Amino acid sequence: MDAREPGTDAGPPPARRPGRTGERLGRRAFVTAASAAAVFAGTGTAAGAATGPAAPPALTGLDGALPAFHPLLKEELRFPLAWGTSPIRDPRAWRRAARAKVEEHLFVAPDHTPFAPEFGERRSERDGFTRELVTFSLTRYERVRGALLTPHGRGLFPAVLLLHDHGARFDIGKEKLVRPWYDDTRLASAQEWAERYFSGRFVGDELARRGYAVLAVDALGWGDRGPVTYEQQQALASNLYHLGSSLAGLMAREDVRAAAFLAGLDRVDRRRVAALGFSMGAFRAWQTAALSDDVAAAASVCWMTGLKEVMVPGNNILRGQSSYYMLHPGLARYLDFPDVASIGAPKPMFFLNGGLDPLFPADGVRVAHDKLRAVWRSHRAEERLRLTTWPDLGHVFTAPQQDDVVAWLDSVL
């Protein structure tokens, strides 16, 4: 597996820290200080002779990039607000409560700043759509430039908010999905990315050819809003935390705002707006569907798992860095990843995974799919949920997968 998969960290695996005998710290059991003191104080002649229940051995040090006691932390994760665990039995009431809990952990307030868009010159394409750049206030803090594609014709058109991946590639963001007609310097990078992950296609251009209005915007750190370096991601996240904000929360709010902007365009049918993304963009797509009333459907390619199942030694999520874009501190005390995605129910949602994807173990995908099914079933809307695993594919969004998604969008929008 290439370490620089989209949506993952790209740094080298963490170094092992040897003990005196060469083993990693955390692989050994230590007697707690309290137990040792009891023995030497005469309260017991041996570890088994002390009165009362014996204290469990302390797990000390590190297990790679995890604390050695991480299994105990996992056991404490009960996801008490998850559907089926929560005492709330009405699906709509549960949806409101779960969404409020997610909002609480974003640490970024909702934003109602006027978009005040400025549209650039339109460029008409022979294959049935026009391209233009649009600059608008994504938040009260920043105006951003987006790529906007519009099919030829009168409209109103169904629309897709395209959400780019991570991939440890920061010089391009929206350009990973929309051919950068406005910047020849980014074209080579964009074409290489399309060849590597999208069968040589620009997904946004393909959607526009098939009748969808498309908007793609850079997340903070990519393209026009970067480029951040790989090492700077942690500092960026830390600095936002120090400022009482959150990198993941900011991205979540920005994606909701981008969906609202797209839905409000006079060329778009606001009842037919979908979110679509690959890898980190897939995370963003189901998250936006959960938090935005402007998104009617979502398709997420290669990002869905149970948290416990993905927090295992060797998984890229443990390397930090890119994870900060998808980390809402404290939220795991209440909800798992599929629980958050399920807030989008009963909207039509499509989750695609690759059977050979090294980033998302099969058991994590199964756990997530079971949770998703239960929530859509509670809404009596099972037919609106589609869960697909392509057994022979890894972490990619190939042309056949794209065709499958477009056909699904046609059916639900």
Image: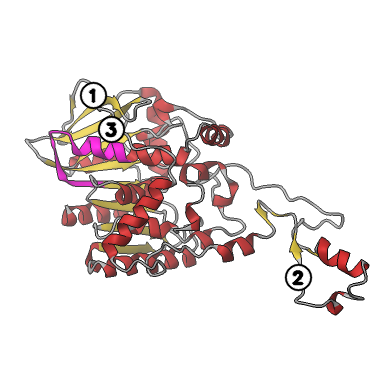
Q: Secondary structure at mark 3?
A: loop
Q: Secondary structure at mark 1?
A: loop
Q: On screen, 381 above or below 47?
A: above
Callout 3 crowding tier (Cα within 10 Å): few <14, some 14–19, many ≥20: few
Residue identifier under label 2: 55
The percent coordinates of residue 180 (x first, y second) are 32, 29
Q: Amino acid at mark 1?
A: Ala
The percent coordinates of residue 369 (x first, y second) are 38, 66
Tell whether position 270 is magenta: yes
Q: Which is nearer the eye, 298 or 395?
A: 298
Q: Residue at 22%, 21% (x, y): give it.
A: 120
Q: Secondary structure at mark 2?
A: loop
Q: Residue 265 got which mark?
A: none
Q: Residue 116 got which mark?
A: 1
- The magenta segment is 256-274
Q: Residue at 35%, 34% (x, y): give it.
A: 174
Disc with the residue nearer the chain's start (2 vs 1): 2
Q: Amino acid at mark 3?
A: His
Residue 31 seen in the current view: no
Position of 304 compared to 267: left or right? Answer: right
Residue 36 seen in the current view: yes
Outermost residue toward the left in this view:
154
Q: Residue at 32%, 46% (x, y): give it.
A: 288
Position of 14 compared to 299: left or right? Answer: right
Mark 3–mark 1 contact, CB under 8 Å? no
Q: Amino acid at mark 2?
A: Ala
Residue identifier under label 3: 112
